[in-house]
């Protein structure tokens, strides 16, 4: 059996980004759990599991880029090309 003590792996307190988003780890944004409690049962995640999930998503994104993208552009590049609406 694999086990851990949640008290030893408690994630940091969330830092509010805006009305709907919180951040506990750098570059990992979450929908504020308080907004979802009425619809989805909330679970405590240990810090290592949050990091594992985030790392897996980055690995998957890198794989998709390597196999399917002719080029990869940043969000900043997209914003530069967007019309200002003036």
Image: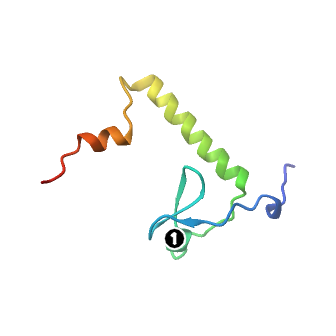
- In which image quadrant can residue 14 be found? bottom right
Residue 12 on image: x %, y %:
68, 62
Q: Report whether 38 appears left or right of 42.
A: left
Camera-side residue: 23 or 7? 23
Look at the numbered disc 1 and give the secondary structure of its residue: loop
| 72 up-or-down from 34: above or below | above
Give coordinates of residue 58: x percent, y percent.
55, 38
**Residue 41 position by quadrant:** bottom right
Q: Foreground residue, 23 or 53?
A: 23
Q: Residue at x 39, y 37 (%)?
A: 74
Residue at coordinates 84% horizontally, 60% vertically from top-left? 5
**Where does residue 86 sit, x and y in percent of width and height?**
12, 54
Query: Residue 82, image x and y in percent?
Result: 23, 44
Q: Which residue is mark 1?
A: 36
Residue at point 82%, 60% (across, down): 8
Q: Most extreme residue toward the right, as rendered?
A: 1
């Amino acid at each position: 059996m694999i086990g851990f003590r949640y008290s030893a792996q408690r994630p940091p307190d969330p830092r509010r980004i805006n009305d709907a988003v919180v951040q506990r780890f750098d570059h990992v944004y979450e929908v504020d759990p308080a907004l979802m409690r009425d619809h989805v049962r909330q679970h405590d995640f240990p810090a290592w599991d949050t990091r594992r999930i985030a790392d897996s998503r980055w690995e998957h994104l890198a794989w998709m880029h390597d196999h399917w993208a002719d080029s990869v552009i940043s969000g900043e590049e997209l914003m530069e090309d967007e019309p200002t609406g003036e």
